[in-house]
Image (tube, grey):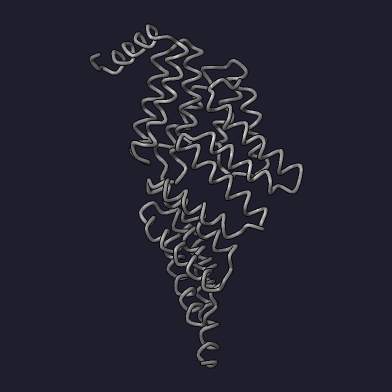
Amino acid sequence: MMEQTTQQQPIAMTLAEKAVAHWQRAEWEAGAEALFMVAQIAVSQKEYDHAGQMYMQIGQALTRVPTRRTESRNAFYQAGLCYRESGNQRNLAAALQQLAVSELAEGRPETGAAMVEAATTLVPDDAEMGIKLRAMQANYQALAGDAAAAVETLGEAMALAETPTARAQIEQLQRWYQLAARQDLPADQLANMIRQTQQGGLVKGLFDRRLLRAYQLMGDGALAEAVTEAQAVRAQAVASADAMRGLRHFQASVLLALAREQQDDYAGVLDALLGCRVLLADIYGEAQAQNVDVLLDGFATRWGADEMASARAAYASRNGMTV
C-alpha cells in the first residue's frame, strides 16, 4: 500500500500541474478533468481534506462554463462529503455556501437559503465565516421580499463582529435593506452605502460597479446618464449565466424605475419593473417575481389611482398592447 501511494504522488503532481496550465489558458473543462483525477487519488489515500480542496477548485472552474453547472454543483457536493469525512467543519460550511450559490443559479433560492442556514450552524464560533454566511442568508431573505428578516439576520452578524470596521459594514448593509424596502432612500446616500459595502468586501459582488455609478449619476441629477448605466447593467444581467444575474437585474430595474419617475415617465417605470418581473419569474419562479408587485403597489400609492391608470395605458400603447 505504501508503494502504491508513493507511485501515485508524482502522478497527482503532474496532473495538478496540467490543470493549472489548462486554466491559465482558460481551458476550464480540461483543467477540471485533470484535477478530478487528483481528487480521486487523494480519496483513495484517505486524504479527504486535500480531496475536498481539489473538488472545490473543480467546482469553481466549472462555474465558468454555463453548460457544466450540474458538474460544478456535483463537485461542490463531493467536496462537502470529503470535508464531512475529515471533520473539517469550516470547509464543509464553505462547500455548502458554494452549493447554495449553485441552487440559486438553478432557480431554487429556497434550497440555497436552507443550505446557508445549515452552514451557519457548523461554525458557531467562527466570526469571519459566520458573518459572511449571515450576509448571504440576508441576501436570500431580501430576494424573497422579506427585508425585515434580512435586517434581523444581519443583527446576528453584528453580534459576531469583533472590529469597528466589520460592525460599520454590517450596519451599512442593514440600512440598505431597511431603506430599499421603503423606496425613499436618496440616491447619493444609497451610492455611499453601496461604496462602503464594496470597499469593505462584506458581500463581494453584491453591487455592480456600473450600478454604483448609476446611483451616483442620479444623485448628481444626471438622469439620462444614470438610465444608460442602469440599462447596461440590465442587459449584461440578461446575457449572463452567473447565479447573481437576477439580483443585479432587480437592483438595476429599481434604479431605472426611480430615475424614470424623476423624469415623469411613469410608463417607463412600469416598463422597467414589469420587464424585471418576467426575468425573475423565469429564473427564480413566480413566488420571487411577485416581489415586484410590492414595488408596483408602492408606486401606485405614491401616484394615486388615476395616474397609475394613465401610466398603464401609456405602457400598453408603447408596447403595442390593448388595455
| Depth check, front residue: 153 or 246 | 153
| Depth check, front residue: 262 or 284 | 284
| Horizontal and vertical percent position of residue 178 | 58, 30
Total marks placed: 0
| Horizontal and vertical percent position of residue 299 | 45, 17
| Depth check, front residue: 213 or 248 | 248
Horizontally, residue 212 falls left or right of residue 316, namely: right
Against 35, residue 104 (above or below) is above
| Horizontal and vertical percent position of residue 229 | 51, 27
Residue furthest out toward the right: 164
Q: Picture quarter containing residue 9? A: bottom right
Residue furthest out toward the left: 322
Q: In the image, what residue occupies the spot 43% across and 12% down? A: 265
Against 240, residue 125 (above or below) is below
| Horizontal and vertical percent position of residue 69 | 39, 55
| Depth check, front residue: 179 or 264 | 179
Against 203, residue 263 (above or below) is above
Residue furthest out toward the top: 306
Q: In the image, what residue occupies the spot 29% across and 13% down? A: 317
Horizontally, residue 104 falls left or right of residue 195, namely: left
Against 176, residue 187 (above or below) is above
Horizontally, residue 130 falls left or right of residue 24, namely: right
Q: Picture quarter containing residue 278? A: top left
Q: In the image, what residue occupies the spot 31% across and 11% down? A: 313
Q: In the image, what residue occupies the spot 54% across and 17% down? A: 223
Quarter of the picture containing the C terminus is: top left
